[in-house]
Amino acid sequence: MAPATAAQPLEFLLNGSPVHVDTASPNMTLLEFLRARGLTGAKEGCAEGECGACAVVLVADEGGRTAFRAVNSCLMFLPMAAQQEIYTVESLASHGALADAQRAMAAAGGSQCGYCTPGFVMSLFAEHYRPGRTGPCDTLALAGNLCRCTGYRPIRDAALALGAPPDDRFRRRLGQASPAIGAVEIDGFARPSTVEACADILARDPSAALVSGATDLGVDSNLHGRRWPTLVSVEGISELRDFSETTTGVTIGAGLPLTDIGRAWREAPPVLAEWLTLFASPLIRNRATLGGNLATASPIGDAAPLLLALDASLRLAGSGGRRTVPLAAFFTGYRKTVLERGELIAAIEIPRPLPALVRFYKIAKRRLDDISTVAAAMAIDQDTAGRVRRARFAFGGVAATPLRLVEAEQAVEGQPWNEAAVERVQDVIQRTLTPMSDHRGTKEFRLEVSKSLVEKFWWERPR
Ligand SMILES: Cc1cc2nc3c(=O)[nH]c(=O)nc-3n(C[C@H](O)[C@H](O)[C@H](O)COP(=O)(O)OP(=O)(O)OC[C@H]3O[C@@H](n4cnc5c(N)ncnc54)[C@H](O)[C@@H]3O)c2cc1C
Ligand code: FES
Ligand code: FES
């Protein structure tokens, strides 16, 4: 599809047919649009990315291969659909014959009231056709879908019953390129293709808001009624979606969805996979980005602790030029950063060598798909005599910003990594952290859990 220019309609492919929308509020969601069009398979359960009842699939490029990618349509602003190719549950059956994912759900008794079922089916459909899948479907692909009445056992059985995808129109679709997501400018929405063009729009229009995966902004709109006259999407800026890994460091485009980071970072330390699994759900990770996570400056965001422990820096770009800022100097206060108006996070740089041991711990009410009460990432390098060469203790949820405990790091560096060193770190935590009490946990709980996580890190050392 050719890039749209000013005042052109919004265009995309929906269930194989072109769609033209002449006027659309930039704040309307894809889910609202689909349902108003009579495609009522996708449901609104929560409108905040928690339940997956609204799941649809996009055709996306995954490292050079075309794949179906399940996303929450409640968190996609409709203009973000421009140039995309989208399939809803209505497109799966052909001439009355159900798709395998639908048949498996029915055969396993995976549906009672049926409210959640189209969402489960779309997540399962994407997993069923996942390029390169050799074993059974991964049931964790359904971790962003909730069911209130059937129970998960039959749904899991349905997923595990699926073999290879049939040689049908969907599989053939994966043999062709995914749509190119390029520049777009329609009323109330712009998707520039360069950082400079993006900075230009932001400088010209003080009311314009940057949007990346919209997994935070969409919740703000749906639940808190926030509205933006103009949204500027970074999805068309290829620089923000790059990934490179060299002997001196790893550079991750700030607009690269988290799922793609996991796929692209071939020599990632094991902590990356642990961290990704604990970050939201596959539906969210398919859209959420590091740029969005860091720019919100949430004290409980999960990216900052891990990236702080890895000594990351941020490459910022805007109308005033480019600069690099250590992540440790990026947060300036509660939900405040050094970002200036018109400036965006272009990339995250992680220097090599990485620490020999890095762990990430997330304390939340639920094991998966939940917001952190406390998050901690710890890293350590030791010399041959067992003395600490480099230590990093980074926490979220214990102060107004995510932070590194530099005093604790200094207290153990050059010393043996033993129980006495753990106690020194715990002493710094007790004296310097200032957590709040809220519905997720009291400040006393947060302090105690932070201290015990250091002990856990020590117990989990390689022996
Ligand atoms: C159900 C659910 C579960 C979640 N679970 C987790 C979780 O487990 N852990 C966690 O940390 N978070 C979680 N989140 C929050 C959210 O998914 C993350 O913060 C995500 O990384 C935001 O990225 P995004 O691309 O969607 O940001 P967006 O919503 O697009 O943007 C967020 C903010 O960042 C700004 N922004 C975006 N990109 C840039 C950029 N490149 N430069 C400058 N500013 C930018 C936007 O203007 C906006 O203010 C969850 C959200 C939902 C809905
Ligand atoms: S309606 Fe619940 S995730 Fe979209
Ligand atoms: S079948 Fe009723 S919510 Fe899942």
Image (cartoon, helix red, strand yellow):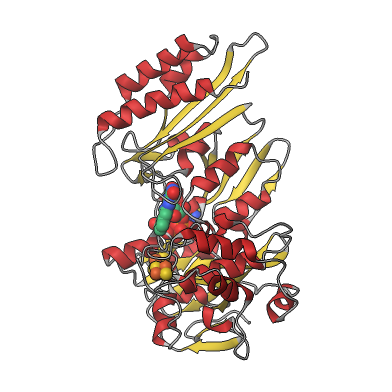
Name the residue rendered at 54%, 32% in the picture: 359
Residue 167 is left or right of residue 3, and the answer is right
Residue 303 is left or right of residue 168, and the answer is left
Measured from the top left, where is residue 74 in percent x and y? Answer: 41, 70
Name the residue rendered at 55%, 68% in the picture: 108
Measured from the top left, where is residue 370 in percent x and y? Answer: 40, 49
Name the residue rendered at 38%, 23% in the picture: 451
Name the residue rendered at 26%, 28% in the picture: 444
Quadrant of the image where one finds ligand 2: bottom left
User: In this view of the protein, can residue 266 be seen by the observer?
Assistant: yes
Measured from the top left, where is residue 244 in percent x and y? Answer: 68, 48
Quarter of the rendering containing residue 429:
top left
For the N terminus, the image quarter is bottom right
Quarter of the rendering containing residue 83:
bottom right
Q: Please name whichever residue, 180 or 417, is drawn nearer the observer in this view of the structure.
A: 417
Q: Please name whichever residue, 321 or 284, is drawn nearer the observer in this view of the structure.
A: 284
Query: Is 325 drawn above or below residue 434 in the view shown?
Result: below
Residue 168 is left or right of residue 287, and the answer is right
User: In this view of the protein, can residue 182 be seen by the observer?
Assistant: no
Query: Is 423 drawn above or below residue 152 in the view shown?
Result: above
Q: Please name whichever residue, 55 or 256, is drawn nearer the observer in this view of the structure.
A: 55
For the C terminus, the image quarter is top right
Quarter of the rendering containing residue 337:
top left
